[in-house]
Each structure stands twice: as C-alpha cells, then as structure tokens.
Image: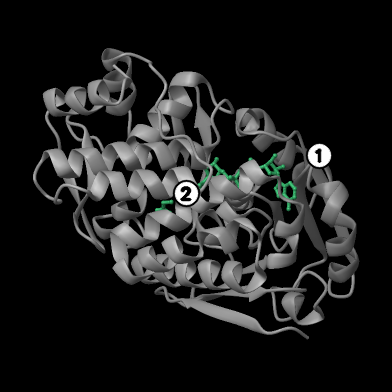
Amino acid sequence: MPATDTVRIQLPDDRDYEIRIGSGLLEAATSWQGLPQAATAVVVSNTTVAPLYAARLRERLLAVYPRVDLVVLPDGEQHKDWTSLNSICDHLLGEALDRRTVLFALGGGVIGDMTGFAAAIYMRGVPFVQVPTTLLAQVDSSVGGKTAINHPLGKNMLGAFYQPERVIADLDTLDSLPDRELSAGLAEVIKYGPIADAAFLGWVEDNLDALRARDKAALGHAVRRSCEIKAHVVGQDEREQGLRAILNFGHTIGHAIEAGLGYGQWLHGEAVGCGMVLAADLSERLGLMPAGFVERLRRLVERAGLPVQPPKLGAERYLALMRVDKKAQAGAIRFVLIEALGQAGLHAVPDARIVETLTAHGAA
Ligand code: NAD
Ligand code: GLY
C-alpha cells in the first residue's frame, strides 16, 4: 500500500481523531476499519461526486457494515441550505435508521459541512466520517468540526461544532477535480503561511507550479502541513473563543463577496483568495506589516489562478454584509490581520479604513 501520512487532532473528552492522507485510501480496507459499529452506514454525496466515487466507497464499506445507503444531493454552494439538509434527515427518518447509524460525507466542503450538521442534529448526534474529495476540503473544511448551512442573509450562519470520527483524504480523488476547484483549494493552502508558518509560505511560493500540475508529493506535503497547522489551532481553541479566528484570514471580505454576488457565483476559495489580498492591504495600511507584503501575497494568489480584483459591490453594501460576519461585535467589523509573517490576530477596523482599502481595489 502507498505511504499514508497521519495527522492527529487532539481534543478533550476522548474525541481525538486521525486525518489520514495519501494515495489509494478509498480502496484501502484499513481506512474503514475501527470505526463505530452500526447496522447501517449512509454515504452522503452529490450528483457530481457520487458517479465518480460512491460505488467504490460503498463496496469497501459493505465489508464493514451490513447495509450501506446512498443519499445524493444536488451539487453547488446554492444548495447548502435547509432543503438539502432536510433531504438527508428525510432519508434517515424515512428509513427509521437508529442512533448508531454512521454517516460518510463523500465530497467537497459543501457536502462535508451539511453531512456534519445532519450528523450533529439527527437524534441529537450520530457518528460521521469525512471523506473529502476537493483540495479545499482536504486542507481545511473536513478538519476541525465546523458544520453549517447558509442563510440568504449570511454564510454558514446555522450550524454546530461537531467533530468527525476520522478524516480520509485520498489524494487520488484530486485527479478528477476541475482546475478552477484546485485553484480554490490553493487559496486555503496559501492562507496557512501568513497566519502560522512563514517557512510554509516560502515553500508554497517555490512549489506552486508543482501543486497546480498535481504533483502527488507536493499535494501530499501541502495537505499534511495544512492539516498539522489546523489541528494545532483547533486543539487549542475548538470553539473559536480566540485563536481559531486566525483561520478566517481573508474570510471577512471573502464571505461578503460570496453573499453579495449570490452563493455559487464566486467559489469560496476564490473569494477567500481575493479577501486575503484586501486583508493584507489593511494589515499594511494599519502599519502592522511593511510595504511589499500586499504585493507578495497578490502575486501568489494570482499565480494560483485566483481572482485578485474584488467585485464592485459598493462600500455600503460591503460594510452591511461584513456586519453580519460572525466575528463582528456590537456592530464593529473585525478582521484577521497579519502582524508578522506567520503571526495573525483579530483587529477591530474603523469603517473609514475599510472604505480606503475597498476604494484602493476598485470595490467601493
Ligand atoms: P464544493 O463542495 O462545492 O466542491 C467543489 C466542486 O467540486 C463541486 O462542484 C463538487 O461537486 C466538485 N467535486 C468535489 N470533489 C470532486 C472530485 N474529486 N472530482 C470532481 N469534482 C469534484 O466546494 P469546496 O471548495 O470543496 O468547499 C467549499 C465549502 O466549504 C464552502 O461552503 C465553505 O463555506 C466550506 N468550508 C468549510 C470550512 C469548515 O471549517 N467547515 C472551511 C472552509 C470552507
Ligand atoms: N475554516 C475556519 C475554521 O475552521 O475555523
């Protein structure tokens, strides 16, 4: 069997779990052994991913579970909503599945977030396993237990903290990922350098071409290092009382772009990439970072195949959208800003400074 990297996420109350990263993991029997026993496993996927990988996963799971069901949801961020969540619950209740049932989220972050939320609320909680098939989901969304659906007034506004039993990140599934989605995942990979590891930022700069060419060794390193950083942060601050907020670098403006344009127009990773450039601009503007940082990050985001020019929604619309952000407090918009390479913190930023940044980037 090809080499597998394992990153362990350490949490209180016996909730530690493993993130396994490597090639061939969908096929490996060991990926599915040692999970909670149940009469039924339910694979949740979507109309794009299910035809590619669900039969293979189902076959492997049938070696462990007597019955394996498949729920296929419509594809897209615009379907990360009550209707899709209900479809999962309709199946679980309609088939009278008991509280030992194990859910398997097979897909990107949309499927992972919704399946995790369904697992959190079905009979007040059933076990679930993340099987991420996008780069974004492998480096970020499948790890750390944030689950959610969107509301028309704000992204990921309805959800729960609920940890999976295990994460199985099979690098081979990335072979079928469209280039645009690979780039979106690279945004979250880029994120980890400025917030936590200056050396990793340099590594990503040096290896970006290999990552875009889907070199397995480069992808494996990027997924492992990203998961190590995320596991370390989540292990210290699972419920985002403080430190975990740094994982949202680029997300304040990113979420505003996604909600402002309508979910599904810009990909989440595209919005985060552009949001990081603007947050870097704020970091420079507020004197936290020396001149040159915005340009360094902008160049990297652009090389990753991501947009760096934010949509012109108007300053008032951006401000209104950002006030719904979960990090806002008493109406003050708070940003994750870079304080030094590899170090980030949460900062309340006056509206006037935000408008300066939006104006400088043609978004106001
Ligand atoms: P996604 O789930 O929409 O997947 C992107 C597209 O790729 C979809 O069309 C999907 O069907 C397709 N796809 C998935 N795997 C494929 C494969 N192997 N081959 C071919 N096509 C494939 O988007 P995403 O970028 O994976 O995730 C974005 C979501 O994740 C957002 O909703 C975001 O809010 C959420 N997110 C959550 C967290 C968290 O901590 N929970 C962190 C970051 C992002
Ligand atoms: N993606 C942000 C977090 O998991 O906290």
**Residue lying at 47% horizontally and 49% vertically, measured from the top left:** 187
Ligand 1 located in image quadrant: top right
The location of residue 115, given as percent across then percent down, is: 64, 49
Quadrant including the N terminus: bottom right
Q: Is residue 162 above or below residue 169?
A: above
The location of residue 88, given as percent across then percent down, is: 72, 41
Which color mode does the image show?
one colour
Q: Residues within 10 Å of mark 1 (few under 14, many from 20)?
A: few
**Residue lying at 77% horizontally and 74% vertically, measured from the top left:** 24
Which labelled disc corresponds to residue 252? none
Q: Earlier in the sequence, mark 2 or mark 1?
A: 1
Does residue 240 appear anywhere in the picture? no
Does residue 280 appear anywhere in the picture? yes
Q: Does residue 147 appear left or right of residue 332 in this picture?
A: right
What element does badge 1 sit on? loop
Q: Is residue 334 above or below residue 103?
A: above
Residue that sits furthest to the left in the current view = 287
Gap between marks 2 and 1, in whole Å?
Answer: 25 Å
In the image, 137 versus 100, the foreground residue is: 137
Badge 1 residue CB within 8 Å of ligand 1? yes
Quadrant including the C terminus: top left
Judging by the rendered image, the residue that carries numbered circle 2 is 187
Judging by the rendered image, the residue that carries numbered circle 1 is 47
Q: Nearer the viewer, mark 2 or mark 1?
A: 2
- Which residue type carries mark 2? Ala
**Residue lying at 50% horizontally and 57% vertically, measured from the top left:** 140
What element does badge 2 sit on? helix
- Which residue type carries mark 1? Thr
In the image, 44 versus 46, the foreground residue is: 46
Q: Does residue 142 appear left or right of residue 131 in this picture?
A: left
